[in-house]
Amino acid sequence: MFGLELSFIWAGIIALAVLIYVILDGFDLGVGLLFPLSKDEGERDVMMNSVAPIWDGNETWLVLGGGGLFAVFPLAYATVMPALYMPIILMLLGLVFRGVAFEYRWRTVRGKHLWDISFFGGSLVASMCQGIALGALVQGIEIENRAYAGGWWDWLTPFSVLTGFAVTVGYAMLGATWLNMKLEGRIQAHMRRLAWPFAIATLVFMGLVSLWTPFLNDAFFGRWFAFPTAIFSFLVPALVAAAVYGLFHGLQRHWDVTPFLCALALFVLGFIGIGISFYPYIVPSSLTIVEAAAPDSSLKFALVGTLVLLPMILSYTIYTYWVFRGKIDPEEGYH
């Protein structure tokens, strides 16, 4: 019984780490996606400055989520990774190009435009691949004898491509609302205008994915339309409607913080919807949380260290955002 509880505790920890990564690194990637829509080099400088103090800390949560999956759900890791090698490798390469662009863009004048392209390209590839990997996981992974039994290209389907575009557009919305919150003057107004079409496109993609998902798997359909979980079929859309109202009302009133928080809420609600669809599976329709968990001794050992490290990571993350709160000074930046 204790082992059962531990496996679900660990599933919650990993889900939390992934969610924090998505909402933090999401706007970070979104800033890169908006680079081609900036008007000049000065705008690009201040856009990058808005995330320069925090971008690498955001990716700590990706390491925690991936490392935690390997440590406490080794069977899930061993089946999911072979199925998603290509999008995950491309995602990591995209993140590498972004990181290099951060450092080298400020060290050159003649080649600055090349690092601008790298920053945008890395952001685009990472965003698309995260969405594609999510879509491939939601649609299911073929497993036989506790091993991946599918083909090399099973991850690439119309549904996974749709989720790739959905996540990418959603990140651009997060980036626009983040820049609206952090910047002032002409560029703030420009980003606020960009937030409107990206927010509308995000809602369209969310609707398409939400309508498609229940028909991918009979278990998904039953979970969303059978009592008592059908309650969430009414509760989640109501909360989404409230977030949408807050987002557009805040943009219309030229508010700084509310649109960003409401955009984050849309991602949190979408993540909750995926969690409801998955439960109690960690790999839909193939491996449950309990089946994929490591032995109880491993779960206990890893949990002790995590209960020490997790508050530390949360603390320095919160402290970093507190220190760099407020508007960006165009005269100061990452050098």
Image (cartoon, rainbow, N blue to C red):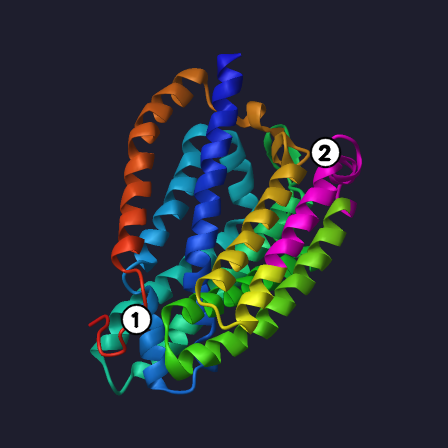
Q: Looking at the rendered structure, which numbered label has been put on residue 229?
A: 2
Circle 2 Cα neighbour tier, 10 Å, few/some/many (<14 / 14–19 / ≥20) = some
Can residue 123 be seen from the camera position used here?
Answer: no
Q: Which residue is mark 1?
A: 328
Asked if residue 327 is positioned above or below residue 286 in the image, the reply reads: below
Asked if residue 82 is positioned above or below residue 181 in the image, the reply reads: above
Dominant secondary structure, magenta: helix
Which of pointers 2 and 1 lies earlier in the amino acid sequence? 2
Q: Amino acid at mark 1?
A: Ile
Asked if residue 321 is positioned above or below residue 331 in the image, the reply reads: above
x, y percent for residue 287 = 62, 30
x, y percent for residue 67 = 39, 38
x, y percent for residue 42 = 32, 84
Asked if residue 39 is positioned above or below residue 247 in the image, the reply reads: below
The residue under the point 56% across, 73% down is 252
Secondary element type, mark 2? loop
Q: How far apart in space, not on screen, are marks 2 and 1 (Cα)?
A: 44 Å
The residue under the point 58% across, 60% down is 246
Res 299 → quadrant: top left
> Was residue 243 drawn as part of the magenta stretch in this picture?
yes
The residue under the point 39% across, 73% down is 118
Res 315 → quadrant: top left
Magenta segment range?
215-244
Q: Amino acid at mark 2?
A: Thr
The residue under the point 30% across, 28% down is 305
Say whether marks 2 and 1 touch (CB < 8 Å): no
Between circles 2 and 1, the one closer to the viewer is 1
